[in-house]
Image (cartoon, rainbow, N blue to C red):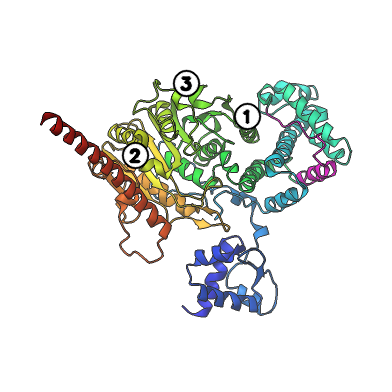
Amino acid sequence: MSSDIQREKFIKTLQELGGSAGNMRLREALGWQESTYNRVRSELIDTGIIAPGRGRGGSVSLVSTNSGPSARRASLIEVKPASATPAADLAPTAEPAQAKSQPRTQGRKAEKNANGNGANLGFEAELFKTADKLRGNMEPSDYKHVVLGLIFLKHISDSFEAKHAELLAVDPQAAEDEDEYLAENIFWVPKEARWSYLQANATNPLIGSLVDTAMDTIEKRNDSLKGVLPKDYARPALDKIMLGELIGRISDIGLGNEQDKSKDLLGRVYEYFLSQFAGSEGKRGGEFYTPRSVVRIMVEMLEPYKGRVYDPCCGSGGMFVQSEKFVAEHGGRRGDIAIYGQESNYVTWRLCKMNLAIRGIDADIRWNSEGSFHKDELKDLRADFILANPPFNVSDWGGERLREDVRWKYGLPPAGNANFAWLQHIVHHLAPSGTAGVVLANGSMSSAQSGEGDIRKAMVEGDVVDCMIALPGQLFYSTQIPVCLWFLARNKGNHGFRDRRGEVLFIDARKLGHMVDRTRKEFSGKDVEKIAGTYHAWREGDGYEDVPGFCKAATVEKIRGHGYVLTPGRYVGAEIADNDEVCFASKLIDLKSRLESQLAEADRLAAVIKENLSMVISNG
């Protein structure tokens, strides 16, 4: 490859990544050796087309120029700095509206921007940096409620004031009628709680008390928000100068006109902040936030066009937000799906309620501290779609108190691990033709401990396992280990698709995704399209073919031969043109799962031999 072509490819790839990127991430996107990358990088720095950045591992960014040699070279490609990225790029590119019953396969569109979490508004990153600088010594886990609460307050106040102005111009009396706002799913905001009032008092030393009063009065006037909003802005630990500056920064986000409203600006800022706080909190952050690109895969695969959507451990509500977006993007209406959820963490439940309310999504989200296992708030619900990211490998879920339960159709889940309790709880809540997508630890695919292998066997033989997907590591804030997706179906023979009974699709997606920083990976729109498109082609019988190293449709008989281990690597085989860059960690995971299966089989055979020897001795 000539140097000119390499430089052009370097610039184009950097542009696709938003105009700036870490060296490691960019080199992986290019697929180059380090020596090639360093040479081209140096050439472009010397000519002034790119500039080196700081940070561990280093970074580069495009330089916008209007004259000189670098401008002439950059003119080969249209260069857009990161700040020029339009707000609309946050959401997946919408397709033309189509009938909801129309099957869609590998040609479907998925999200376009490289950032699978949709964090590309242009100003939201700067807003977050400013907000984060203001927090001082506060922990991110505490500070997130300060910021997210203000964003929520700004949203409902702007929505109210826009409607208030509209009514005032027509009928001043109607402008003071709460029912006029309720009819359009707009919260009533009293004068002392409106953003304009708080903004005018941002430098008041009592601003913390004013915000608390605003939150309290809004809850009193809107039953659905009772107990949801944070009301501790007056506490001494929260610096009031910082709070005033934060109100000033959030005031820059406009929602007073239809253009801004159509972009769902504050909702996207809220989602971006959720993802950033999840990253700041690490493992704890993963408890309330599932990365958007992972949720996108689950939603694109299940296609929740119409019906009841349920999440028994709903976190901050990301599954619901993406389901609503999916419906809107494909010609449906907001009311086409009914949303139900349960969450045991009260703080996270509040985040979920705000996350849905800021987008105008009506939902039945229940909270109790006992959780879905011990106090199933929606025990009579049978959902058409279930999307869930349960906490992995929970050992203290209280299973010993639930030995006799109607949900354990496929076997008694071990008291020391809740994985198969979650799977069976979810199957129990599926409608007769319902489908589900569940994120679980990789061990769920192969473990034979404490009867888990028997439950997995019963689920396979019961034909409720539809598809298994192995994901790469580093996707989640809460864990760096690879995880998997289980897709379940109550009726694989007759629910609008081809008869798939006796068959399971395996997808190995461990080689997909790209690094967005030193520790975290995301799926691109093409990755999402490849995975979901493969599943739909198989499910709908529309041109599916096995791809060595990526996907394989396996019969139950084949799965029996593997001892009911559901690790996709067992079935998809190797790529036809394999390369030497296959991650050693991925190979090790396959070997580990095989070893676990073989050890379990050895234990079983040893028990049989001991039993037979005992019989021989007793009969001798």
Q: Mark 3 against mark 2, which lies toward the viewer?
A: 2
Q: Earlier in the sequence, mark 3 or mark 2?
A: 3
Image quadrant for the C terminus? top left
Q: Earlier in the sequence, mark 1 or mark 2?
A: 1
Residue 395 position in % (x across, y down): 48, 34
Question: Is residue 556 shown left or right of residue 101?
Answer: left
Look at label 1 and name its amino acid. Answer: Tyr
Q: Which residue is mark 1?
A: 346
Q: Earlier in the sequence, mark 1 or mark 3?
A: 1
Residue 244 position in % (x across, y down): 83, 42
Q: Is residue 80 visible?
A: yes
Q: Which residue is mark 3?
A: 379
Q: Residue at coordinates 48% horizontally, 39% vertically from top-left?
A: 392
Farthest residue to the right: give it.
Answer: 204
> In what element is the residue under mark 3?
loop
Question: Is residue 570 shown left or right of residue 620?
Answer: right
Residue 346 position in % (x across, y down): 62, 29
Q: Residue at coordinates 65% horizontally, 60% vertically from top-left?
A: 82
Q: Name the image quarter holding residue 163.
A: top right
Range of residues picked out in magenta: 228-252
In the rendered structure, does residue 105 fall within the stretch colored magenta? Answer: no
Q: Which residue is mark 2?
A: 448
Observer-nearest of 541 and 221: 221
